[in-house]
């Protein structure tokens, strides 16, 4: 029995190594991240990255009652490269606080191919006027794959006029996830590992 479990462990471990190697080969590198716009809104802005995602935290992107501004804009830009072609940009806009009263959030996005210059993806201006519209999620399919892109995200916040109620517009978190073309070699490696494990179990 010990021999069987030992062999199974080695097979599972091998599959895990194949999977880890595949994930690593599809990792995306994010760089040249910039925040620009109304100074109070981008104050304290930061970002964090994962294998294929980048998240932006905006602790002061808020306008309206009791704020320094009633309207303002900010822009986020960054570049991303990958050994495997990127084909889609999934944008998840998560709002803590959202909108209230006369609050409005507007945003758009443009994705530029840096390998063969040209725009390969756009998100037309979206308008949020109610918390029922949040969180907002949308996919931007590229017109062609690319290994190096530049993304520009533009945001407009407004809470004007001042009504009798609470007028507020706020963005706290923007989550972005990029999708890549599955690499044939990686898929084949994982398939071989799984097949080897299945064959070993049948022999037992």
Image (spheres, rainbow, N blue to C red):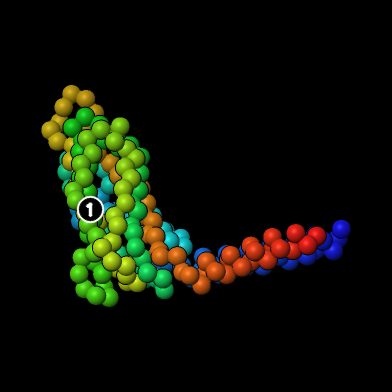
Q: Where residue 6 sits in the image (x, y, percent)?
A: 80, 63
Left or right position of 188 against 114: right
Which residue is found at the position 31% from the left and 42% from the top? Answer: 136
Say which element carries label 1.
strand
- Work out whether residue 177 or residue 46 is closer to the camera in this orientation and state it: 177
Left or right position of 81 against 23: left
Which residue is found at the position 78% from the left and 62% from the top? Answer: 203
- Number of numbered discs on residues: 1
Which residue corresponds to mark 1? 123
Asked which quadrant contains residue 42, the reply is bottom left
How packed mark 1 is, by other alpha carbons closer than 10 Å (few <14, some 14-19, many 20 or more), is: some
Residue 132's place in the image compared with 6, above or below, is: above
Residue that extends furthest to the top in the rendered view of this protein? 164
Residue that extends furthest to the bottom in the rendered view of this protein? 115
Residue 165's place in the image compared with 1, above or below, is: above
Q: Where residue 110 sits in the image (x, y, percent)?
A: 22, 59
Asked which quadrant contains residue 1, the reply is bottom right
Residue that extends furthest to the left in the rendered view of this protein? 161
Residue that extends furthest to the right in the rendered view of this protein? 1
Residue 148's place in the image compared with 36, above or below, is: below
Which residue is found at the position 21% from the left and 45% from the top? Answer: 126
Q: Taking the image as drawn, is residue 184 in sight? A: yes
- Work out whether residue 54 or residue 139 is closer to the camera in this orientation and state it: 139
Q: Where residue 156 sits in the image (x, y, percent)?
A: 19, 47
Left or right position of 67 against 183: left
Q: Where residue 175 sits in the image (x, y, percent)?
A: 37, 51
Q: Quadrant of the C terminus?
A: bottom right
Asked which quadrant contains residue 82, the reply is bottom left
Which residue is found at the position 34% from the left and 63% from the top? Answer: 87
Q: Taking the image as drawn, is residue 57 in sight? A: no
């Amino acid at each position: 029995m010990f021999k069987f479990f030992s062999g199974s462990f080695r097979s599972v471990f091998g599959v895990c190594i194949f999977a880890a190697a595949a994930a690593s080969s599809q990792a995306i590198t994010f760089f040249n991240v910039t925040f620009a716009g109304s100074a109070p809104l981008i104050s304290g802005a930061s970002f964090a990255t994962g294998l294929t995602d980048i998240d932006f935290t905006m602790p002061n992107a808020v306008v309206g009652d009791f704020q320094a501004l009633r309207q303002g804009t900010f822009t986020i830009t960054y570049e991303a490269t990958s050994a495997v072609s990127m084909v889609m940009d999934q944008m998840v806009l998560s709002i803590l606080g959202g909108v209230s009263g006369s609050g409005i959030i507007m945003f758009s996005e443009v994705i530029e191919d840096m390998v063969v210059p040209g725009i390969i993806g756009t998100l037309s201006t979206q308008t949020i006027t109610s918390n029922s519209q949040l969180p907002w999620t949308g996919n931007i399919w590229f017109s062609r794959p690319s290994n190096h892109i530049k993304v520009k995200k533009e945001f407009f916040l407004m809470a004007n006029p001042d009504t009798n109620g609470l007028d507020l517009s706020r963005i706290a978190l923007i989550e972005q996830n990029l999708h890549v073309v599955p690499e044939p070699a990686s898929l084949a490696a994982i398939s071989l590992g799984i097949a080897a494990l299945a064959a070993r179990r049948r022999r037992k």
